[in-house]
Image: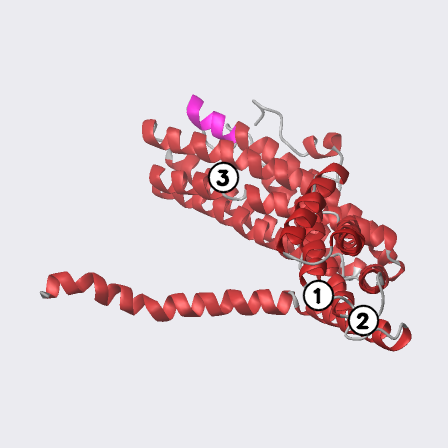
Amino acid sequence: MTSSEAAPYRSRFRRVPEVVGKRGRSGWARMTSGFFQAVQMTVAAVGAYVIAERLLGHQGPIFAATAALVSLGYAKGGLRYRRVLEVSIGCTLGIVMGDLLIQVLGHGEWQAALVLLLSLLLARFLDNGAIFTTQMGLQSVLVVLLPPSQDGVFARSFDAVVGCLCALLLAYVIPQDPRREPRQDLSKLIVEFTQVLTDCSRAVSDTDSRLAWHALVRARQTQPLVDSVRSGLTASREIAHASPLHRRHRREIDDLSESIRYVDLAVRNSRVFARRLASVLNRVSLSDDAVASLSEALADLSDAILSLDHTFSASHPQTRESYLRQTRNELISVAGRLEPGLMGVRTMEGEALVLLIRPLVVDLLESTGLTHEEAIRYLPTLGGR
């Protein structure tokens, strides 16, 4: 093999430590973020097993542990209590159905196939959830394939009920802090959002349309983060309104839900702006004053959004209010400059860029708690000096 042929392999080999490090960091992040759920699942599974074995007197009640484990599971977003209840019902019905049919059909491979088919059809009749169907089919076929229980006909069904009740109890009484995941996802979204505006600022100052296109691509890739925040807040509202432990956080979660609506609108506006900016930089030369003022406004807007991230992540009400005032003042400072004449913009294309920034800033001001009417008052009148 020649040196030129070996070069790509050497390049890949040099990237191995970087890839391994990245995988290690992401794995560690997943492990630490899922630690509470892992403890919760462990307590539910072992607790259900102990209850079924020592209180009910069952021998090796493995279905109690498995029912608790699959009912809680690792879940991100969605309706957590509904999910736990859905999986619990599916798991229990599957075991009950297996216990019933085993008395009629007996044990065997064809019996297992028939029980599985009937369980899956019944699950689809009762609910269209994939998890519900999977758990009902899995548990029913296990009942048929495993040796009969020595504790009676419906012993395994009672074990499943115990496991599911333990899972529901832990999910209700000791849920995860409902603010944690939305804050983490919102922080990731805001970091990406600030990078979009920073890239746009650099694209203006360097007259680099390619960098503007990169900002557009990055802005388009933020939609999964927005969806993740929204689904996480749906679950968080459910936990905060149902769990006695976290009801005091309802106001904060409601505020986050209201803020993300306007942050989403601002992110969407940034995509429109980045696309327009790339087109303008390809076709028009902006004046030096316009370049300096536009670049500065976008950079200051990026800094203001970082302050918004501090607002959302602060847990103490007074700290949160302090960051909120700081963010609002920074946004007001940017808003007051958004008039083409004041920014030295003389071309129609440059004016269009300023007009696209204005609704973005209004959305961000509304995310800080201002009404639409209050937010637009901080924008200068078009054509004014």
Q: Whole-percent x and y of residue 68?
A: 76, 63
Q: What whole-number distance in Å separates the C-alpha atoms at marks 2 and 3?
A: 59 Å
The mark closer to the camera, 1 or 3, is: 1
Q: Which mark is residue 146?
A: none
The residue that disc 2 covers is: 150
| First in residue order: circle 1 vs circle 3 | 1
Residue type for callout 1 = Gln
Q: Which residue is at the front of the view, 374 or 121?
A: 121
Pick whichever, 160 or 316, lies toward us. 160
221, 75: nearer the viewer: 75
Work out whether residue 313 can be spotted: no
- At x 58%, y 49%, the residue is 189
Asked if residue 169 lies in the magenta stretch, the reply is: no
Percent position of residue 311, x then y:
69, 54
Name the quadrant of the N terminus.
bottom left
Q: Earlier in the sequence, mark 1 or mark 2?
A: 1
Q: Which residues are magenta?
A: 348-354
Q: Position of residue 343 (x, y in %)?
A: 49, 33
On screen, residue 243 above or below 372: below
Quarter of the image with the C terminus is: top right
User: Which residue is pictured at 46% across the width and 44% down the height?
Assistant: 218
Instruction: Out of 352 and 75, give the one closest to the viewer.
Output: 75
Tag 3 residue: 220
Q: Residue furthest bottom?
A: 54
Q: Amino acid at mark 3?
A: Arg
Q: Residues within 10 Å of mark 3 (few under 14, many from 20)?
A: some
In the rendered image, which residue does mark 1 sit on? 37
Magenta stretch, overall SS: helix
